[in-house]
Amino acid sequence: MSVRVYVPGDMAAVAVGADQVATALTAAARAAGIDIDVVRNGSRGLFTLETLVEVETPQGRIGYGPVDAADVPGLVAAGLFAGGAHAQRLGPVEALPFFARQTRLTFARAGLTDPLSLTDYRAHGGLKGLETALALTPAEVVARVKASGLRGRGGAGFPTGIKWETVLAAPGPHKYIVCNADEGDSGTFADRLLMEADPFVLVEGMAIAAHAVGADYGYVYIRSEYPFAIARMQAAIDLARGDGWLGRGFDLEVRVGAGAYVCGEETALLESLEGRRGQVRAKPPLPAHKGLFGRPTVINNVLSLAAVPFILAEGANAYQDFGFGRSRGTMPIQLAGDVVNGGVFETPFGLTLGELVDDIAGGCVGGRPVRAVQVGGPLGAYFPRGLFDTPFDYEAFTARGGLIGHGGVVVFNDTVDLAQQARFAMEFCAAESCGKCTPCRIGSTRGVEVIDRIVAGEARAANIAVLEDLCETMKLGSLCALGGFTPYPVMSALDHFPEDFGGADARRAAE
Amino acid sequence: MTHPPDSAADDALDSLIAPHRNHPGALLPLLHDVQHALGCIPHEAVPRIAAALNLSRAEVHGVVTFYADFRTTPPARRVVKLCMAEACQARGCHTTAARLSAATGLAVGETSADNALALEPIYCLGLCASGPAALVDDVPVARLSGLRLDALIAELGR
Ligand SMILES: Cc1cc2nc3c(=O)[nH]c(=O)nc-3n(C[C@H](O)[C@H](O)[C@H](O)COP(=O)(O)O)c2cc1C
Ligand code: SF4
Ligand code: FES
């Protein structure tokens, strides 16, 4: 009987040498006369441990990590294929605190299964949600999604059930399901990992959405920076079609972005899918009424759609029982930047930022002090330690002048210069602006210049006032959140870290 | 085909275009295919693409220039796309960039005069817990500091 060995094949594992580890393991096994069966699973989600090798033993799956190809001969000599003792032996991975503390509903299968095995998918509870949905009327499915309290995970937090209800009520015959897999925010990778580690759950979520609203076609719009996710989703769609759960009244295809951050904005994404420049459309009309090719369209983030199979399979209450305030269910939070434990941490809403950064992420590498945390991507605020008591919840972050966005948490150590981070936010806005609104297109370039003047000590107080004015104009005069929210990182940096902008006195003088 | 192809290049272009005719919103997938096959979107290809999809040349040109991925000249023989976004900044991508620049003589955003190497910025690869991250000739590479960066520099041979 062959020994089953798991070596992740997702982009983050491959980027640190997982392919070489797999090759080395195969060679070492052959040399030792041991028959092994290498499964290229997705990462379990703690990237610090990659390459994480797991071996199926009579005592369960035993992990070793982080493994480099050069470590393989030593590990094999120590009896890795039988779960033998070694300094890199981690034991059962689910018992490690990072995993034991999670509540994995959306990521339940990620890392455990062969991502493209329909047998694994079914054996681990896959397709129960779709089967339940198909036995219900569309209105009943919509009612369950509404009752779950699920809110859009792409950033805006709009209730998914209400969006679906609008599309269900809109006249057909043709309607679309569009999955937003543009995931452009720095510090986010949950969409990527889900598509690479468990692509069928997204296909299942989209098939449920199609039944719920009466859609006949769907697109998964994936950014071009994600070649592994693109290939994996394409393969999963073909397998699902072959298995009969696509192609009967609803079919899907993958579309690839082309390096424009603004195409994550839903109407720019629709323009891009139609073959045009990714320029934001004015609303109304809502995509739910007139979306892709003028048809009623559901557009949802990967994580929103992938949460739905659980909700249908286990019931709306099972989902909505988790959570905090009006943020129901779980959020796959992404811990990134200078952290000891970086990765996807799925948990009910409500942990504080401090618990996430200090306890779970383990603070900065080498014990350096954490100075700032940017939550919610390039349009999210920079929080100082003083705000670490903020619970991870849409409303709580808004109340503190921030946002949770797509759930990215980027940790910076004490060497960070917040004036430079503010400058980068303006620069990024200028580079990625779709060009429709003057405050976003021109204001952001002015913003870079003004920050440079403040830092250089030129008429500080006056220039700080100019920057504040400029941010106000961007907030009020922008059609979408690229121009409208860039003031969040800029103003939070200035408000919480005035000393980086030429001294605390300068700030006081401005007031 | 309604007219004979003018040359082998046109022939190649036509066979790239054919599968996309009559597909809704086909322009981006077609441009990706053209760039994949030819390395870029040559200016001469624009009128043919426009005609095939019933678009104006200006529309096609507008799309090619809007998206950062599409290029109108062939790429360098080797391309390092280094992530310069926030999470990689927090993990030291500026130091990585400085070391790469010192070794190659190229600033981020520059291509060598002999078109052998380009050092380009990219904004997030979803490897934000393992940065600094890069695509080296489209192969993902992470933890690009210390010895792993030394190895990349040696491998680039500059
Ligand atoms: C500049 C900009 C970029 C965005 N990028 C993304 C993205 O990459 N992925 C995403 O799901 N939503 C993104 N959004 C939010 C979408 O516009 C939209 O709210 C979302 O796709 C709706 O899906 P949801 O309700 O499931 O969150 C972005 C918004 C803006 C303004
Ligand atoms: S705010 Fe910026 S990105 Fe958004 S629509 Fe206006 S110009 Fe385009
Ligand atoms: S910020 Fe560099 S990979 Fe995400």
Image (cartoon, coloured by chain):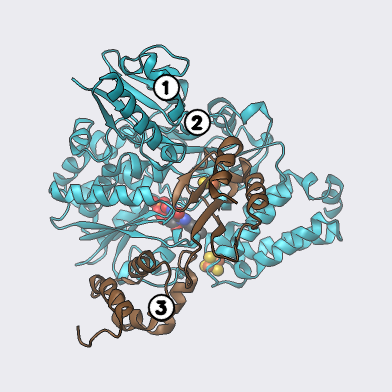
Chain colours: A cyan, B brown
Residue beneath the point at 34% across and 66% down = B33
**Nearer to us: label 1 or label 2:** 2
Q: Which chain carries label 2?
A: A
Q: What residue type is labelled 1?
A: Ala
For disc 1, the neighbor class at 10 Å (few under 14, some 14 to 19, many from 20) is few
Q: In this view, does B96 lie to the left or right of A75?
A: right
In what quadrant of the picture does the N terminus of chain A appear? top left
Query: Is the Cβ of the residue at disc 2 closer than 8 Å to that at disc 3?
Result: no
Name the residue at 28% across, 42% down.
Answer: A201
Amino acid type assigned to the residue bearing label 3 in the image:
Val
State the residue in front, A232 or A137.
A232
State the residue at coordinates (36%, 34%).
A8
Residue A85 position in % (x across, y down): 41, 11
Dot 3: few (<14), some (14–19), or many (≥20) neighbours within 10 Å? many
Tell me which amino acid carries mark 2. Thr
> What residue sits right under mark 1 in the picture?
A100
Query: Mark 1 or 2 closer to N-term?
Result: 2
Q: Mark 3 points at which residue?
A: B60
**Would residue A379 appear left or right of B24 to someone viewing this image?**
right
Task: Examine the image and state in which quarter residue B113 appears.
Answer: bottom right
Up the image or down, A291 lies above or below A186; here it is below
Image coords of residue A425 (percent x, y)? 63, 55
Is label 3 in a helix, a strand or a loop?
helix
* Vertical order, A278 against A308 (above or below): below
Is residue A471 among the parts visible in the rendering? yes
Q: Name the residue under label 2.
A: A48
Same chain? Circles 2 and 3 = no
Q: Residue B91: horizontal and vertical position, in percent?
A: 61, 40
> Whole-percent x and y of residue A274?
34, 70
What's the distance in space between the residues labelled 1 and 3, CA to CA?
Answer: 52 Å
For mark 1, give the secondary structure. helix
Chain assignment, label 3: B
